[in-house]
Amino acid sequence: MAEETKAEEKVEKAEEKAAAAPAEEEKKEGKKKKEKRGKKPHKNKPSSKRWKKYKIEDGKLIRGKNCPRCGPGIFLMKAKNRVYCGKCHYTEFLSKEKIESEKK
Ligand SMILES: [Zn+2]
């Protein structure tokens, strides 16, 4: 009977070793991080809202209204009753007819 109890003890010790093994591996993986030098990692910048003025519908490019003073590429801000250029402060007031037509 004494031999059997010894065998059981051995099995228990083996199980303990198996449980302890993965913890040891984790310690090895957690090496100290080296200090970063030189180039900083690239971060994506938020894209300009300008590109929201472009839309593609049925394969055609639809652009918002451009500023007549600044030329193409400079879009006009839309307000209730006017359009406004943030670059040269050009303002164009919309007539009531235009506003109603744009609502549709
Ligand atoms: Zn302008």
Image (spheres, grey):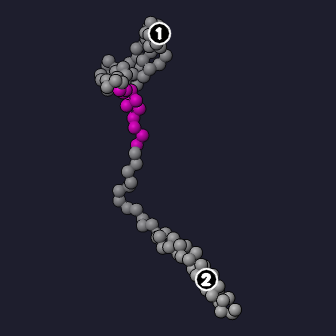
**Could you say which disc has been placed on residue 11 in the image?**
2
Mark 1 residue element: helix
Nearest to N terminus: mark 1 or mark 2: 2
Label 1 with label 2: CB-CB less than 8 Å: no
Task: Please report the residue visible at 45 percent of the width from the left and 66 percent of the height from the top.
Answer: 33
Of circles 1 and 2, which is in front? 2
Q: Position of residue 1 (x, y in %)?
A: 69, 92
Mark 2 residue element: helix
Amino acid carrying label 2: it is Val
The part of the image, by quadrant, that contains residue 73 is: top left
Task: Please report the residue visible at 38 percent of the width from the left and 61 percent of the height from the top.
Answer: 37
Vertical order, 45 against 65 (above or below)? below
Tag 1 residue: 100
Q: Which residues are magenta?
A: 45-56
Vertical order, 59 against 19 (above or below)? above
Q: Position of residue 91 (x, y in %)?
A: 41, 16
Q: Position of residue 53 (x, y in %)?
A: 39, 26
Q: Is residue 52 magenta?
A: yes
Of all residues shown, which one is farthest toward the bottom? Answer: 2
Q: CA distance from mark 1 to mark 2?
A: 86 Å
Amino acid carrying label 1: it is Glu
Tell me if mark 1 has few (under 14), some (14-19) or many (20+) residues whose alpha carbon lies within 10 angstroms of its own: few
Nearer to the camera, 48 or 31: 31
